[in-house]
Image: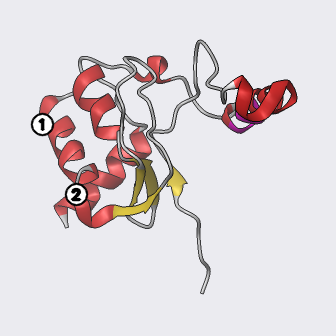
Amino acid sequence: MTIIDPTPVGFWKTEGQATVLPFESVGLLGRLAAIVINNALEAHLPSVRDCVDPKWDPKERARVLAYISDQRFRSTGYMGYSTCRICGKDNGTADFSDGRYVWPEGFDHYIREHAVRPPRAFVRHVLWMVSR
């Protein structure tokens, strides 16, 4: 049996000021390392602002929102809140996964509050899953 890692969706690069640890706790070299590591990890991630689509069909959006908010998909929790890349709201601490995709707990916030539209492949997957 082949095990496939879930495809991440709804993860965005940090734009604007980098989030770094307080100077006192890690020193200058630790702060610089945190910035370099963060930038390297996020280099492949899309900009959330490039995914805004206020004309997205409301019925399709509602189906996607219901699917990604389903608590049966809740999985791993982390040590701190993710922050919305648009408005700064705390967006939760967990990931959700249906086995095929993995998304952050705050993904519904982006869709609901900022009209972010997920990639077409993910939307097709969700619509297929809810029609079964």
Residue located farthest toward the left when viewing the structure as drawn: 59
Asked which quadrant contains residue 53, the reply is top left
Locate residue 106 relative to residue 82 in the image: left or right. Answer: left
- Dot 2 corresponds to which residue? 70
Pick the front one: 28 or 127: 28
Name the residue located 71 percent from the left edge and 34 percent from the top edge. Answer: 25
Image location (x, y in percent) of residue 107: 35, 39
Pick the front one: 122 or 101: 101
Q: Is 94 above or below relative to 89?
A: below
Counting labels gives 2
Q: What residue type is labelled 2?
A: Asp
Magenta-highlighted residues: 37-41
Q: Measure how far apart labels 1 and 2 are at the Cα level.
A: 17 Å
Q: Is 49 above or below relative to 123?
A: above
User: Is residue 39 covered in magenta?
Assistant: yes
- Dot 1 corresponds to which residue? 59
Query: Label 2 crowding class (10 Å Cα cut-off): few <14, some 14-19, many 20+?
Result: few
Image location (x, y in percent) of residue 98: 37, 64
Image location (x, y in percent) of residue 27: 81, 28
Quarter of the figure that contains the C terminus:
bottom left
Residue located farthest toward the front when viewing the structure as drawn: 24
Circles 1 and 2: CB distance less than 8 Å?
no
